[in-house]
Image (tube, rainbow, N blue to C red):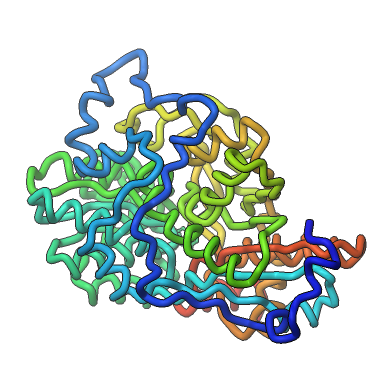
Amino acid sequence: MSSRKDTAKTASASTRRQFSLPVEEIPRKWYNILADLPEPLPPPMDPEEGESRLSALPEMLIGECLKQEMSTERWIDVPEDLISLYAQAGRPRPLFRALSLERHLKTPARLYYKGEFYSPTGSHKVNTALAQAYYAKEAGFERLTTETGAGQWGTALAYAATLVGLRCTVYWVRAVSKWKQSRMNFMRLMGAEVFPSPSDKTETGRKLFEKNPDHPGSLGIAISEGLEDAKRDKKAIYSLGSVLNHVLLHQTIIGLETQKQFEMAGEYPDLVISCLGGGSNFGGFALPFLGDALTKGKKTRFIAAQSQVAPNLQGEYRYDFADHGELTPLLKMYTLGHRVDMEPIKGDGLRYHGCSPILSYLRSKGYIDTVAYPQDEKHVFERARTFILTEGFLPAPESAYSIACAIDEAVKCKETGEEKVIAFNISGHGFMDMEGYSEVLGL
Ligand SMILES: Cc1ncc(COP(=O)(O)O)c(C=O)c1O
């Protein structure tokens, strides 16, 4: 924790609200934490019965992404054309000091949030969508298939596909697709075809759809649908928006920028907080700081904000499938079970049964704490309301969980008098999620 002496900065530094990097400072390399783990990450495995999923991996994933998935190189180059796409998407993104929120809370903590919400499609998902679309195009594919929960990943991939000249098919968890009509239209405007999932387009989907055409769906089901679709079309390849090592790798661009911005602020976070579904946003933000904890002995605390409907980090640490239809290899992760039923919520991007293998491993070693908020989401949305009224920005429902956790910690600091530096990531904006706010807050 920073001492009072450390914090006696110049008046201008202590009231500075924004820390921005020029376009030349877009990170040129992604950070691969696999190089810094104290032991190799438990690898994916085949189940005891059935066909080998491992040998099907080269047909399941984009070649370059599969290479990155296995790589233990510490730094992996971002291709020059991709840097240009990142610039087109508005990177680097600012880091803000939440001065108005701090004053409102009367907390001695200093709160900083990363503005991933300044994304053309609304979230951090663009960071890996552009990378995956770029590599898929390079490999000669013509179409991408995928799942989406909140709709943010589907929109990000539709956008990235359009920019590089690919088609895109999205299987969207039905419970969410029903109330986010403007996001549906946004994806379609960008040329994607979108099917509520479970759909009648795939075997996995049909089995569930025929029993219940109103089935709410889940990310695990939508992943199976995307995989099945790509498997029957040689010109298509599947693209996953979270969980896997290469997805977190691409997202480290968030934390790498944030580290430079903390240097500008003359601070280092005591607490790093973000929401966690499959782990791409939490990982992207936290992994560079977790690398410091592993290699430099930094004592930062990491907290993943989750929902009580899907507290996957409180599940069992064991091998499980990443999808409902059991098409993927088994991954060693904290899981609630790949066929568990979970009630829909407004922050539905957090409703996934398992957590990324990298983050699961780090949790098993005691590096990551978790907090799970109640299903009614009232506390989370009230905290988001406080943020909106002070900082003036509308977060995505998922990002509201990061905010709730950061404010809860800042309130604790008020009670103890600790001057902690709290960093949190606002992974997306909520401009297409107003119905969620209206319903939970009774607007
Ligand atoms: C804005 C936003 N933040 C966070 C998440 C959680 O996913 P992940 O854990 O992969 O970041 C989602 C998922 O859809 C999302 O849309």
Classify residue 185 by image quadrant. bottom left
Q: In this view, does 255 lie to the left or right of 233?
A: right
Choose between 219 and 236: the one closer to the eye: 236
What residue appears at the point 64 percent right and 57 percent down from the top-left corner? 273
What is the quadrant of the N terminus in the image? Answer: bottom right
Q: In this view, does 392 lie to the left or right of 234?
A: right
Residue 21 location in percent, x, y? 46, 75
What residue appears at the point 55 percent right and 32 percent down from the top-left corner? 361
What is the quadrant of the C terminus in the image? Answer: bottom right
Q: Is residue 98 visible?
A: yes
Placement of 156 over or under 79, stated as above or below: below
What residue appears at the point 57 percent right and 28 percent down from the top-left corner? 317
Residue 406 location in percent, x, y? 70, 63
Q: In this view, does 249 lie to the left or right of 409?
A: left
What residue appears at the point 74 percent right and 81 percent down from the top-left corner? 10
Placement of 40 over or under 233, stated as above or below: above
Choose between 364 and 190: the one closer to the eye: 364
Residue 386 location in percent, x, y? 71, 78
Hey, which residue is sitting farthest top in the picture?
48
Q: What count of labels does the image hold?
A: 0
Q: Is residue 193 visible?
A: no
Choose between 337 and 271: the one closer to the eye: 271
Q: Is residue 128 left or right of residue 229?
A: right
